[in-house]
Amino acid sequence: MGFLSKLFAPARGPKSQTGYVKREGKGAIWIYVQCDKCGEKIPVRLRTTSELQRREGPDAELGPGMFFVKKTVVGSKCYQRIEVAVEFDAKYDVVESKVTKGKLITYQDYRQNNEQ
């Protein structure tokens, strides 16, 4: 592939996973985590202006997403610490996630179980 075709080719990044993020205006998004121990579903609000970190310069090659966040989440039932690391693309959709002692769930999963 020539230089110009590489330059004008569409960007090929990791595939985003839809349904895991709920947007709230311009400055916030929600992700949802479920505890492995007690099954509690925990909503986590993230401010896009201060809590999400942008990958720039040499750090851009360290992960698949344009933005990332690392948080410790604690619910109200069993107080187990859930370690969450999530990578986001430019549209704040989840690209990759790693959750210790829990799992990332979709907004629909969160709503279904909380309405019952």
Image (cartoon, helix red, strand yellow):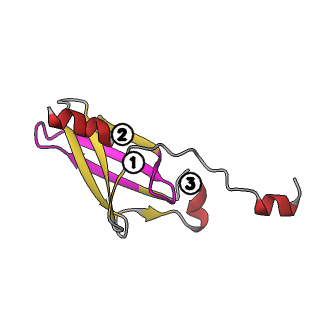
Q: What residue type is disc 1 on?
A: Ala
Q: Is residue 89 above or below residue 78?
A: below
Amino acid type indicated by mark 2: Val
Residue 67 is situated, as x and y percent measured from the top left of the image, at 47, 59
Report if the CB atoms under discs 2 and 1 are less than 8 Å apart. Answer: yes
Of labels 1 and 3, earlier in sequence is: 3
Residue at x-position 29% and y-position 44%: 32
Over which residues does the magenta segment extend? 69-95
Q: How many marks?
A: 3
Mark 1 and mark 3: span between their CA atoms?
13 Å
Residue hosting label 2: 99
Q: Is residue 38 left or right of residue 105?
A: left
What's the residue at 56%, 61% (across, down)? Answer: 59
Which of the numbered marks, if any, corresponds to residue 85? 1
Q: Residues within 10 Å of mark 1 (few under 14, many from 20)?
A: some
Amino acid type, mark 3: Leu
CB under 8 Å between callouts 1 and 3?
no
Disc 3 designates what residue?
Answer: 62
